[in-house]
Image (spheres, helix red, strand yellow):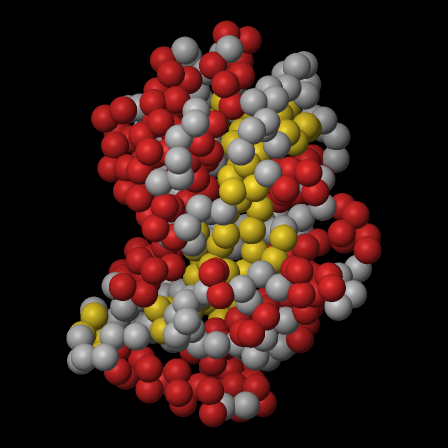
Amino acid sequence: MTKHLTLVSGISLIALVASAVAASAETLADIEAAAKKEGMLTTIALPHDWCNYGGIIDSFKAKYPDIKVNELNPDAGSADELEAIRANKDNKGPQAPDVVDVGLAFGPQAQKEGLIQPYKVSTWDGIPAEIKDADGFWAGSYYGVMALGVNKDLVKESPVKWDDLKKAEFAQSFALTGDPRASNQAILAIMAMGMSQGAKPGAESGKKGLEFMAEVNKAGNFVPVTAKSGTIAQGQTPIVAAWDYNLLAWRDSLKGNPPMDVVIPEGPVLAGVYVQAISAFAPHPNAAKLWMEHIFSNEGQNGFVKGYCHTARFNEMVKAGEVPKELLDALPPAEAYARAVFPSIDEQAKNKEVVTGQWDAVVGAKVAE
C-alpha cells in the first residue's frame, strides 16, 4: 500500500484504507441492515448465461428480498465497466454501478485510477493470493479456458486447432465476442491465438495474435460481428472464440437447435480469471459488500460451478466435499485444464496494451455490436 498522501481521482488512498479498516470492524449483520436501508444494488455487464449469473442474481434476490437488483448493460466489456464508473462518479442515480466484474488485467488498472475501494469478504483467506489484491481492492472469483463454439448444422468438420481457422472451408465463419479494443474476452482470445503460434504470454502474444487475426481476416474468414448465442443460432457466426463456460451455456440454451460443438483447441490452453470489485463511488456500498459476500460464499461459488466455471475457492471446496458431484461431473474435461496457462497480471496487461493499441493498424476490422 502506498504510504504517502497521493490523491487519485479525488480520493485519498489514506481515506480508502481507513474505510477498509472500518469495514473490518463491521459485522455481516451490520452490513445487511445498512444494505436493506439502501434498498438497491446496481450491477453491470452480467449476462444471465455468463457463468450462471442469472441463477446467482436470483439467489441473491431470494436471500435479500428487500434489495432491488438494478442491472445495467449486460453485454458491456471490461473497459465499458470502468468507463461507467468514471462517467458516473458524481452521479448517485441508477446509472452508477456499485460493483464490477472485469478481466484480471483491469483490476489493477481500476485500482491505480482510484475507481475501486477495498473490501475483504469473510471467506478472503480461501482465495488464492495470486488472484487477489493484498489490500482487498479486487479479488478473482472464477475462471475458464478459451475455446471454440461451432454451429454443427453449418460446420460439419469442427476446427481442432487455432490454425484451422485460416482454412478456405471456414470462409465468413469465425467471430469474436466483442471489440478487441474493449472486450476482455476478445483481447484474451487474441492472446490465445498468439500463444498457439509459439508466442510467450505478454507483448509477444499480442503481436503474434494480431498477425494471426490479420491472416484470418485477409483469408475472408473473419466475421466482424459481436458473437452471441443468437448469432450462432442464426448462422451469422458459425464459429466463435469464447470462454468454455459461455459456449457450454449457449449450447444448453439452444437445446440442439442448432447442435453445437465446444472445442478446446490443441496446444497451450489459455485460462482467464475475472475479478470482482466495488466502485469507489458506489451509491449503495453496503449492498455491494453484501453482493461480494454472496458470490464468494459456498452458495455463490457453487452457482458459478453450475455455470461451468471453475472458482476462486474451487480446490478448497472440493477438498471439503462442498461441491455437489453432479456439478463436478458436468465440467469440461480435466485434461484441458491440465494444459491451462495462467498469464500473470503483467503479461495480461502487456498483451492488452498491444492488442488495444494496434488492432486498427494490424487487422483493421471494426467489430459491430
The image quarter containing residue 335 is top right
Q: Quick check: 15 left or right of 278?
A: left
- Residue at image point 53% right, 64% down: 128
Q: Looking at this view, is 114 or 317 the one in front?
A: 317
- Residue at image point 55% right, 36% down: 269
Q: Quick check: 244 left or right of 334?
A: left
Q: Quick check: 57 left or right of 276?
A: right
Whether residue 15 is situated above or below residue 58 in the rendered picture: below
Whether residue 115 is situated above or below residue 348 in the rendered picture: below
From this viewpoint, which residue is outermost toward the top?
168
* Residue 47 locus on image (x, y percent): 54, 50
Whether residue 1 is situated above or below residue 56 in the rendered picture: below
* Residue 360 locus on image (x, y percent): 26, 29
Q: Looking at this view, is 204 or 365 the one in front?
A: 204
* Residue 92 locus on image (x, y percent): 34, 73
Q: Looking at this view, is 355 or 43 the one in front?
A: 355
- Residue at image point 49% right, 47% down: 342
- Residue at image point 35% right, 69% down: 116
Q: Where the C terminus falls, by quadrant?
A: top left
